[in-house]
Structure formats: structure tokens, C-alpha cells
Amino acid sequence: MRKIITGAALVLATALLTGCGSGDSPAPADKPASAAQPKAKAGDGGGQVKHEVTLEVLGTGTTSVYYNLDTNRMEQVQLPWKKTSTITLTTDAEKKVGLGVSVVPGSVTGSDGMLHAAPCVITVDGKKVADNQDGKSDKMCEYKVK
């Protein structure tokens, strides 16, 4: 039963990530970190901006992780888990609006014996830009890389 609920939650999160943009102001975790400035590469000519983005899910044991970074994937992983990729912004629209990256952590057993969301963190160019308050928030970790 738990696997069915977790799977349904991941499918719902996938649908929300791929289809809905409400136009509302971003959540506090979506505010850009002042130190996560774009790194323009010399000699690009096209004005490309590159960012190193790292997604992390902390904890122990195994869980399912859904993420959107260089691809949309769901994996069964051993915790702690980390995925790093370089995101390249090439168009003016990508630079203005940003590219969304996210991680939906699966459940882990807490010290109270109950299932809780695993802690997740997103860093851009080495600076933390989003987290789920060490798993205390029921929200996924998401950020728009600009």
C-alpha cells in the first residue's frame, strides 16, 4: 500500500512539474542566492551561461527519488544520494525566465518510527538555493536556474 501511495505521489508531482505554471510569485526557497551568479564562459560568442547544479537527498537506507536536472528521472537510490550536472542557458528566454530543476525525495523512517520526507538540498555554483528544512517540509526542493 505504501508503494502505491508513494508512486501516486511521484506521478502527481511529475504532472505538476511538467504541466503547471501558476504565475504566482515564487516560494521563498525559489529566491535566487546572491552568490549564485551566472558564469559566462569566455569565447562562447553566443552568450551562453553555465551553472553547476547539484541535487542531494540525505538520510540512510534506500528510497525513490524523482528529479528534473539534465533529464526527468525516477530512481531507487541508496542514501545519501547526489547528482551534479552543468546547466547551460543559451537563449534570452532561458536567461530571463530560468530553467526549473527539482528533486522529490522519497520517504525515510524517522527517529519516531514514522515515515517522513527525506531531507533534500539544491546547490547552484556551490551555494545552497533550496531545501525542505531537513525534511520537515512536505514540499519538494525546486529552483529556477537563471
Image (cartoon, rainbow, N blue to C red):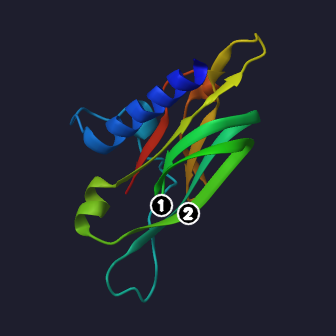
Give the answer, above or below, for where 102 lies relative to 26. below
Residue placed most toward the observer, 48 or 7: 7
Q: Kindly state the secondary structure of the residue where label 1 is placed.
A: loop
Q: Amino acid at mark 2?
A: Ser
Q: Quadrant of the N terminus?
A: top right
In the rendered image, which quarter is residue 28 located in? top left
Q: Which mark is residue 121?
A: none
* Relative height, residue 114 to residue 40 (above, below): above
- Mark 2 or mark 1: name the one nearer the start of the chain: 1
Q: Which residue is mark 1?
A: 70
Labelled pair 2, 1 in contact (Cβ < 8 Å): yes
Q: Which of the 4 quarters of the picture holds residue 84?
A: bottom right
Give the x, y percent position of residue 139: 48, 27
The mark lying in front, picked from 2 and 1, is 1
- Name the residue located 33 percent from the left edge and 35 percent from the top edge: 16
Spatial separation of the CA atoms under disc 2 and disc 1: 7 Å
Quadrant containing the C terminus in the rendered view: bottom left
Q: Residue at x 42, y 34 (%)?
A: 11
Give the residue pinned by disc 2.
Answer: 85
